[in-house]
Image (cartoon, rainbow, N blue to C red):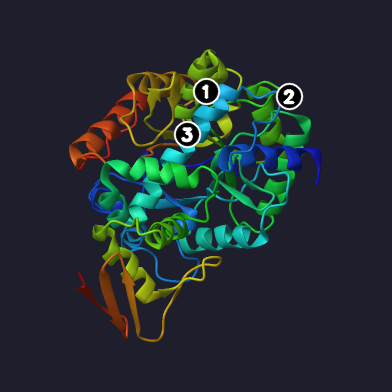
């Protein structure tokens, strides 16, 4: 299942902005943190409302640790699959990253080396996960503040090999592409030319801020104009079926979220979702 | 443990327990990541324990970072709980944070090592001068001092 019907501009559903999300007249695509949804208890009311309106809601896992050298925890895979069924999600997503090792939680998404050994580990874990899923999985490359010393592959070769071997889709976070390129001193748009853009299931668009001489992908700041410009560059090459605003804290007034959603619509050429009949 | 597993564990230890940065990494960048991780955890704990963070006020970030720098997360509920108990044990929990800790203690059972569970029986707990009485899930906060 490579082809998805276009959903247009979406948003990451969070309890703090549930009222704002519920009031978006043109919304057809949302994402929810998979670990925040109970596999069997009641769904959060806001999500039920979105499902009743026919909005696609994609569970986004953050704690599977697909990039861990250790096999994924079967209970976490079962939970992700159960949440996808409850939401009747068209797909699920997770990260090319690890979040724990040797029984210790990192509390964050950590980069893995761009090595053959790490590719093998990710591919094995994605296969284990796909065995339980009824729907495709999209993998998201993360923003990394540092790289491993023993990288054998460049970013594009590393991602393409993982996607090919695991038969996964790509969740391309445009803000992560921007952050990595800025922190590594590389050209962000050049990566687009070497990725299999037809495999992009959807995109994240988020904000960040620079301090300590490094750009941090915070999801708690405004989306920079540079990231919106990259959205336009990506869509000029191959427009993904959905692009969503990802905000995880320090929620601004509704007018600012509205302006960011409209800016993503303008950059991608999709209709605005913030006005009725748009 | 494979080579990759051991090396992933060493990196987690550097970021969460104050272990040395593994050879070959850009130590300055790993340090930036370590500090960013502590800041992110501080925000998560402050959301779970707003009374604690507010009562410490300008001291919050320093107290948090000093405590958390060598302690990997057990989740923000338990992290905040462990810190609040430690502060209470050395009489350093601000009175304004007492009601929050005493309420949690009275409504949930937490052994310090596994996930907290709701209490079924009535309980009375005290923290930083505040007494909390819980019966049948209903909570009354009594200021003792």
Mark 2 and mark 1 residues within 8 Å of each other at the beta carbon? no
Q: Identify the residue under disc 3.
A: B35
Position of residue A49 measured from the top left corner of the image (x, y, whole percent): 31, 60
* Contact check, label 3 and label 1, Cβ < 8 Å: no
Cβ–Cβ below 8 Å for labels 2 and 3? no
Q: Residue at x 71, y 26 (%)?
A: B23
Report the residue at 66% width, 34% height from top.
A112
As drawn, A23 above or below A192:
below
Residue corresponding to mark 1: A180
Q: Earlier in the sequence, mark 2 or mark 1?
A: 2
Residue B140 at x, y percent in the picture? 23, 77
Label 1: state its secondary structure.
helix
Question: Is disc 3 surrounded by few (<14), some (14 to 19) or many (20+) residues within 10 Å?
Answer: some
Note whether residue A62 is visible: yes
Above-or-below relation of B106 to A54: below
- Marks 3 and 1 on same chain: no
Disc number at residue B37? none
Q: Residue at x 44, y 45 (%)?
A: B41
Q: Nearer the viewer, residue A95 or A192?
A: A95
Do the dots labelled 2 and 1 sit on one chain? yes
Q: Quadrant of the C terminus of chain B?
A: bottom left
Q: CA distance from mark 3 to mark 1?
A: 18 Å
Measuring from the top left, give residue B56's x and y in whole percent: 29, 49
Identified at 55% across, 67% down, the residue is B114
Mark linked to residue A150: 2
Spot occupied by residue A178 in the image (x, y as percentages of width and height): 46, 22
User: Disc 2 sits on a residue from what chain?
Assistant: A
**Which mark's residue is nearer the viewer, 2 or 3?**
3
């Amino acid at each position: 299942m490579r082809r998805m019907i276009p959903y247009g501009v979406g948003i990451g559903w969070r309890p703090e902005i549930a009222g704002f999300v519920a009031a978006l007249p043109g919304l057809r695509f949302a994402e929810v943190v998979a670990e925040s949804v109970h596999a069997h208890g009641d769904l959060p009311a806001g999500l039920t409302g979105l499902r009743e309106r026919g909005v696609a809601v994609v569970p986004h896992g953050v704690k599977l640790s697909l990039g861990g050298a250790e096999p994924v925890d079967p209970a976490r895979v079962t939970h992700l699959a159960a949440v996808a069924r409850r939401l009747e999600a068209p797909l699920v997503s997770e990260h090319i990253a690890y979040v724990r090792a040797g029984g210790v939680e990192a509390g964050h998404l950590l980069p893995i080396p761009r090595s053959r050994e790490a590719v093998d580990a990710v591919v094995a874990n994605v296969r284990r996960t796909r065995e339980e899923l009824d729907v495709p999985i999209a993998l998201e490359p993360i923003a990394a503040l540092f790289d491993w010393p023993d990288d054998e592959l460049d970013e594009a070769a590393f991602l393409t090999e993982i996607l090919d071997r695991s038969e996964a889709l790509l969740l391309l976070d445009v803000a992560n592409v921007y952050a990595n390129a800025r922190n590594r001193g590389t050209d962000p748009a050049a990566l687009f030319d070497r990725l299999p853009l037809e495999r992009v299931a959807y995109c994240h668009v988020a904000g960040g801020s620079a301090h300590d001489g490094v750009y941090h992908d915070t999801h708690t700041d405004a989306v920079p104009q540079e990231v919106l410009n990259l959205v336009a560059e990506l869509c000029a090459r191959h427009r993904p079926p959905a692009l969503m605003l990802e905000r995880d804290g320090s929620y601004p007034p509704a007018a600012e979220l509205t302006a960011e959603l409209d800016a993503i619509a303008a950059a991608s050429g999709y209709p605005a979702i913030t006005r009725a009949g748009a | 443990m494979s080579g990759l597993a051991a090396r992933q564990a060493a990196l987690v230890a550097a970021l969460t327990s104050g272990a040395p940065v593994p050879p070959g990494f850009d130590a300055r960048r790993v340090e930036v990541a370590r500090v960013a991780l502590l800041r992110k955890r501080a925000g998560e704990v402050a959301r779970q324990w707003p009374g604690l963070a507010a009562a410490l006020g300008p001291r919050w970030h320093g107290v948090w970072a000093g405590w958390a720098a060598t302690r990997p997360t057990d989740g923000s509920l338990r992290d905040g709980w462990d810190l609040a108990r430690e502060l209470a044990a050395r009489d350093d929990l601000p009175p304004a944070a007492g009601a929050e800790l005493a309420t949690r203690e009275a409504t949930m059972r937490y052994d310090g090592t596994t996930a907290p569970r709701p209490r079924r029986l009535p309980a009375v707990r005290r923290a930083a001068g505040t007494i909390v009485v819980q019966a049948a899930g209903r909570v009354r906060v009594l200021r003792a001092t």
